[in-house]
């Protein structure tokens, strides 16, 4: 099996011989020879490097800041994990810390693949002034930093968030987008729980939203339409997000694997057409129960302390909640 990524498109070839025969039948021996030469010219190391599945660094990012009603400010951070598969786990410490002040400012220790925007916020006092809050991350041997500041150019509002995440086009707004308020997510039950390895626990959350922005997702698509969509060129070069309400659980902190049932919508920008992601063109949002209560089970594969992150997203804006699970 070969995995090749050319011009941003990842292709997995399960059976090289079958692929060669297909090309020979359709395009003749010359096409087969050219393809074989191309494959042989790519060493396994080069293929792995081009696909960026594992081993690449993670770059923290400062997304901007917004004021609070009490005079304080929230600095907003995210990151870019260059890997498509690897989810590095880095505890708070020498390789994952903030400065100045407390090294732990609520940052994740699990880094989901690819671009993750507006992942968390750090509150700084009203007299913060022109100081910088620096988030340092060292993953796969590369140390990178993000610098949080209150410079006016980094001021963020709801329209900026919707634009940056792909809900709106660049420089576009409407009465609907300006009226949108974030969804509300309320986790039911205790904020700290216990579990046993291999035994599922139930996560129940109440999701409420104003119905804005109106969903751009289709409820159903026939096979011909899906096939056409898979090969249709992108409508714009920037990230494009399908506006639809969903709620997703992910592991924010914790060293083991957690299996969620049903599988959760991705909160990272997986732009592949068949991805379970609002940034994938064939994505269909999960059905939201009429009472707004969403039930999910989580099963842990090893003991430890986990922080589970629940995010509600209406396409443009979001709301986050967390629970801690001690697994025995």
Image (cartoon, grey):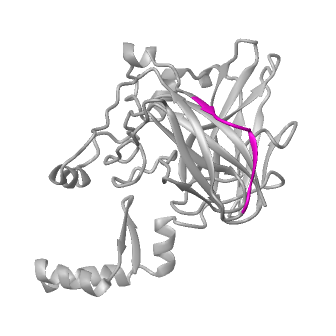
Q: Residue at x 50, y 73 (%)?
A: 48
Q: Is residue 296 left or right of residue 66?
A: left
Query: In the figure, 50 relative to 271: above or below?
Result: below
Q: Is residue 93 left or right of residue 283?
A: right
Q: Residue at x 52, y 35 (%)?
A: 293
Classify the position of the C terminus by image quarter. bottom right
Query: In the figure, 278 relative to 31: above or below?
Result: above
Residue 213 lies in quadrant: top left
Q: Does the magenta stretch include residue 266?
A: no
Residue 143 lies in quadrant: bottom right
As rendered, which of 142 and 1 lies closer to the eye? Answer: 1
Residue 12 lies in quadrant: bottom left
Rendering coords of residue 74 (x, y %) = 70, 25
As rendered, which of 238 and 190 lies closer to the eye? Answer: 190
Rendering coords of residue 75 (x, y %) = 69, 29
Q: Number of labelled discs? A: 0
Rendering coords of residue 140 (x, y %) = 68, 64
Instruction: Give the residues drawn in magenta, as a range.
Output: 185-196
Q: Residue at x 77, y 34 (%)?
A: 133
Classify the position of the N terminus by image quarter. bottom left
Rendering coords of residue 274 (x, y %) = 34, 55
Q: Residue at x 61, y 48 (%)?
A: 202
């Amino acid at each position: 099996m070969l995995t090749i990524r050319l011009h941003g498109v990842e292709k997995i070839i399960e059976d090289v011989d079958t692929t060669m025969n297909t090309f020979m039948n359709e395009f003749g021996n010359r096409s087969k020879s050219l393809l074989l030469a191309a494959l042989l010219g790519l060493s396994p190391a080069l293929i792995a490097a081009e696909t960026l599945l594992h081993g690449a660094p993670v770059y923290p990012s400062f997304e901007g800041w917004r004021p609070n009603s009490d005079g304080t400010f929230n600095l907003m951070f995210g990151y870019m994990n260059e890997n498509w598969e690897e989810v590095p786990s880095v505890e708070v410490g020498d390789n994952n810390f903030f400065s100045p002040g407390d090294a732990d400012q609520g940052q994740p220790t699990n880094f989901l693949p690819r671009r993750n925007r507006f992942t968390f916020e750090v509150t700084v006092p009203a007299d913060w002034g022109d100081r910088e809050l620096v988030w340092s991350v060292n993953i796969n041997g590369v140390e990178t930093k993000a610098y949080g500041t209150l410079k006016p150019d980094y001021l963020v509002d709801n329209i900026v968030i919707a634009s940056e995440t792909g809900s709106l086009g660049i420089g576009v707004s409407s009465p609907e987008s300006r009226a949108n308020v974030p969804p509300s997510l309320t986790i039911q039950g205790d904020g700290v729980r216990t579990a046993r390895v291999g035994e599922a626990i139930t996560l129940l959350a109440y999701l409420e939203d104003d119905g804005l922005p109106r969903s751009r997702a289709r409820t159903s698509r026939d096979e011909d339409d899906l096939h056409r969509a898979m090969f249709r060129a992108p409508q714009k070069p920037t990230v494009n997000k399908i506006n639809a309400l969903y709620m997703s659980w992910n592991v924010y902190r914790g060293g083991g694997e957690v299996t969620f049932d049903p599988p959760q919508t991705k909160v990272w920008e997986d732009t592949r057409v068949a991805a379970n992601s609002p940034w994938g063109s064939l994505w269909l949002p999960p059905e939201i129960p009429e009472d707004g209560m969403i039930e999910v089970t989580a099963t842990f594969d090893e003991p430890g302390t986990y922080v589970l992150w629940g995010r509600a997203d209406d396409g443009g804006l979001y709301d986050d909640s967390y629970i801690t699970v001690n697994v025995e």
